[in-house]
Image: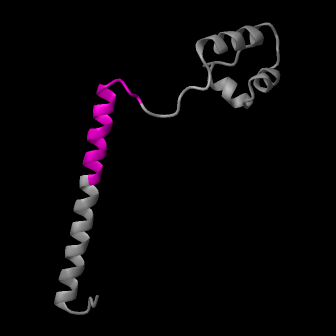
Amino acid sequence: MDKSNATGQLMFHLFAAFAEFEQNLIEERSAAGRAAARARGRLGGRPEKFGQKDIEMMKALIESGTPIKDVAEKWGVSRTTIYRYFEKPLK
């Protein structure tokens, strides 16, 4: 495409406008799909690693004096993941 003349510039801008229009349509459809899924009760995202029972067991171990490192190794996750499940570090 030759952008050095008026016709080339017009074509370039038309293609750019169509590309932007197509992207906007994709975004609208995606937003509508997410809203419909949310209305059906689907939240999206990665599922939680631990259930309530696991969290209670972790809390009991930590409160009994088990080091965070050992708790993390038992569940196969990092210490950061354990800390993330509790608002404040348990000591």
Residue 60, image quadrant: top right
Residue at 30% across, 39% down: 33
Task: Please say if 20 is above or below 78.
Answer: below
Q: Magenta residues?
A: 26-43
Q: Quadrant of the C terminus?
A: top right
Q: Which residue occupies the foreground of this view, 81 or 42?
A: 42
Residue at 25% across, 92% down: 4
Predominant SS along the magenta part: helix
Task: Please say if 14 is above or below 70.
Answer: below
Task: Please say if 16 is above or below 24.
Answer: below
Q: Position of residue 5 (x, y in %)?
A: 21, 92
Q: Quadrant of the N terminus?
A: bottom left
Q: Position of residue 23 (x, y in %)?
A: 29, 58
Q: Position of residue 85 (x, y in %)?
A: 62, 21
Was residue 72 drawn as part of the magenta stretch in this picture? no
Residue at 43% across, 33% down: 44
- Tell whether 81 sits left or right of 16: right
Residue 61, image quadrant: top right
Residue 55, image quadrant: top right
